[in-house]
Amino acid sequence: MALRNGVLVHGPTTWAAAVRLPDGSIKVAAERKRLIGNRVENPLLRGPARLLEAVAVLPALKRGLPEAKLPFEQPRIIGAMLASAVGVRVVRDTRLTPVAKELAAGLLALTPALLSLRGDDLAAYHGAEHISIGTYEHDEPRAREHERCGSPLIGPLLVTSAAANAVASAVPRQYRRPARAAASLGGLAAATELFGWMVRNPERPLARALAKPGHELQHRYATKEPTPEQVEVAEAALRACLALEAVSA
């Protein structure tokens, strides 16, 4: 995960983050995770569990490295989140077809995340994160795009969530709220399972076709070429994570 002033790296059982301080030095923090999502094997729950694992690290990150600047810690992004929530409610009250409503709502919900990538150094640190991890995994210099970035998950998630919520919108009104909650969980589970299949089968034509929009999003919008100093920060986070994983093994 890219920060506005550094990088957060997730390992199987640990996390580590590094940030560049105003004086030019690098500060690093690392801890073991309290919640391990990959221990969940149920296909319906393992995708949401891994997402919850990633989110659960953030409070520990802010305690251990208070200088870390999260992508959404900006007034304009908070404003965009509020506007997006209002927009989703407005769209769902229109006369569009259920599937069109849910696709539009999904796109609106992505707006704050896309907006956050246009400010500060976030996109560059995103690229630095991919370069450092890709170079380590493949033992050769890699580009700023990475096959396991969350960007390729967006397309499958929009489709599965839209389909599931369209079905939920057809249930009687008094049951619609719990139906939407179940649909969101099901859509997320289906999307993460599909994403996992894409990562495991990159040579398949369908996997390449599904991954292409996310790769283009990374290349054209979500990342930019980092400076050597930004790559240095990402490598510091990666080294700290690997060192703590080695101790934990």
Image (cartoon, rainbow, N blue to C red):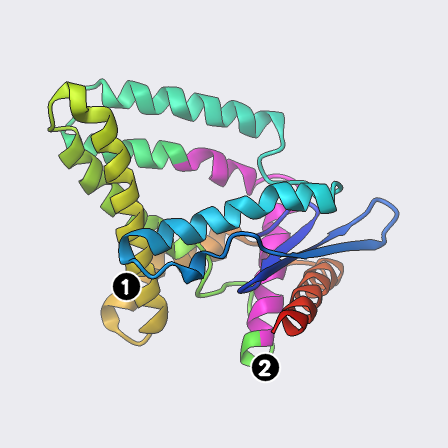
Q: In the drawing, does residue 118 fall left or right of residue 196?
A: right
Dot 1 amino acid type: Ala
Q: Is residue 209 magenta?
A: no
Is residue 99 at least partly visible in the picture? Answer: no
- The residue to which callout 1 is attached is 209
Real-space Cα distance between discs 1 and 2?
26 Å
Q: Is residue 120 magenta?
A: yes
Give how far across and how far down residue 196 sits, in percent. Answer: 34, 64
Residue 215 is situated, as x and y percent measured from the top left of the image, at: 41, 60
Q: Secondary structure at mark 2?
A: loop
Q: In this picture, is 37 found above or below 56? A: below
In the image: residue 49, left or right of residue 92:
right
> Residue at coordinates 69% horizontally, 51% vertically from top-left?
6
**Mark 1 or mark 2, which is nearer to you?**
2
Q: List the residue tagged with mark 2.
A: 139
Q: Which label's residue is closer to the chain start, 1 or 2?
A: 2
Q: Please state the extent of the stretch shown in magenta in the rendering.
A: 110-136
Kindly state the secondary structure of the residue where label 1 is placed. helix
**On the image, which quarter does residue 216 sit in?**
bottom left
Q: Which residue lies at the image location 27% right of the left edge and 52% below the top edge?
A: 44
Q: Position of residue 48 (x, y in %)?
A: 37, 49
The reply, left or right, for residue 51 in relation to residue 209 is right
Looking at the picture, which amino acid does disc 2 mark?
Asp
Q: Are marks 1 and 2 in contact (CB under 8 Å)?
A: no
